[in-house]
Amino acid sequence: MLLDVDALCVRYPTRRGTLTAVDHVSLDVARGETVGLVGESGCGKSSLGRALVRLVDADSGAVRLDGTDIVPLEGRRLLPWRKRMQMVFQDPLSALDPRKSVRKTLSLPLELHQMGNRAERRERIDALLEQVGLAPQLADRLPHELSGGQRQRANIARALSIDPDILICDEPVSALDVSLQAQVLNLLGDLQRQRGMAYLFISHDLAAVGYLADRIAVMYLGRIVEVLPRGELWRHAAHPYTRLLLDSIPSRATRSITTASTTVAELPSPYDLPRGCRFRTRCPHAMPECAATDPAAVTLSAGHTVACHLYREGVPARTVALDFSDRVRPSHTHSIERIEEQPN
Ligand code: SF4
């Protein structure tokens, strides 16, 4: 396994007490695979992404890259592993140094990792810019002289410059308008096919994750509550929270949001988590057992795990009859191979 996250915890000391943003999360990503990590804002998914690339420190647990736990590594011992895992941030403007040209920004990681001489680095940057669809003359511009789409392409080129094995993409299209979102998602798909990279694609948008991901992990208040193959998402998503997210995707046909089977309520405070299952205050299927015991993850079928008392180990989700709306993949979703791009 390329990336193996094991019982990772991230806690932040705050004035109100300790906030547990990531609570014993385990997740893996194979070489060349795309795993989508989805959940509402504040669920801890960005903290998880930042802990993976060591922008924040984990309190406990392991992040293994090709079997080596990088959590305890520091300084020079960490450097070769940093090279293998890069991050694409949500806001390309804040991710790029406003005082440095695109060429200088792309050159810095190459210099840090001692990749090539000056001429070779220049050649490599020109090739990278071409690969992400940026004209070479834009290399000498500052970030504020680029459009939003160009900035995100430069941000992706920066992450690719040192040939990582895996990209952690944290909401990479949510700051872009709709036409640019499709272009950047298609670019990420094309780059993956060309380079064989793996992606952990973090998003609040289940529809966007469904475009790119081979598997989808659903996160709620610091925990992974369901992991399932993309092909199972629309018909066999099991966890009531995953169903809520699916029902919240607007249908193009009706321009409406279906909420028939879900209880819409505020996200509980992370400082005052419900006892037992954390989702029980919003769950239409909550039972007394849900308040008493935190559900452990069970495997329903190959690649499909869920943490919910409604399910039993080895019993596929489709055999459990619940009053979920029988929602099928809506007509506005697109093939994983190519997303229809709209004119600017
Ligand atoms: Fe709902 Fe209970 Fe399942 Fe939690 S464990 S999601 S409250 S049914």
Image (spheres, rainbow, N blue to C red):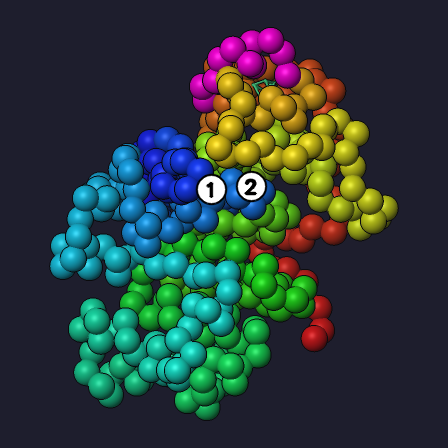
Q: Residue at 19%, 59% (x, y): give it.
A: 79
Looking at the image, in which quadrant does ligand 1 appear?
top right
Q: Please determine whether, in this image, residue 252 is positioned above or below residue 313.
A: below
Provide the secondary structure element on which disc 1 rests: loop
For label 2, being within 8 Å of ligand 1 is answered no
User: Which amino acid, mark 1?
Assistant: Gly
Instruction: Specify the label residue 39 is tagged with.
Output: 2
Q: In this image, 177 relative to 274: left or right?
A: right
For the residues labelled 2 and 1, the Cα–Cα distance comes to 8 Å
Estimate how packed mark 2 is, as few (under 14), some (14 to 19) or many (20 or more) residues with alpha carbons within 10 Å. many
Q: Residue at 67%, 18% (x, y): give it.
A: 285
For label 1, being within 8 Å of ligand 1 is answered no
User: Which amino acid, mark 2?
Assistant: Gly
Instruction: Specify the label residue 8 is tagged with.
Output: none
Looking at this view, is 32 or 91 the one in front? 91
Q: Are marks 2 and 1 in contact (CB under 8 Å)?
A: yes
Which contiguous range is marked in magenta?
286-300
Q: In this image, 234 relative to 104: left or right?
A: right
Residue 229 spot, x, y in % from top left: 52, 36
What residue is disc 1 on?
A: 44
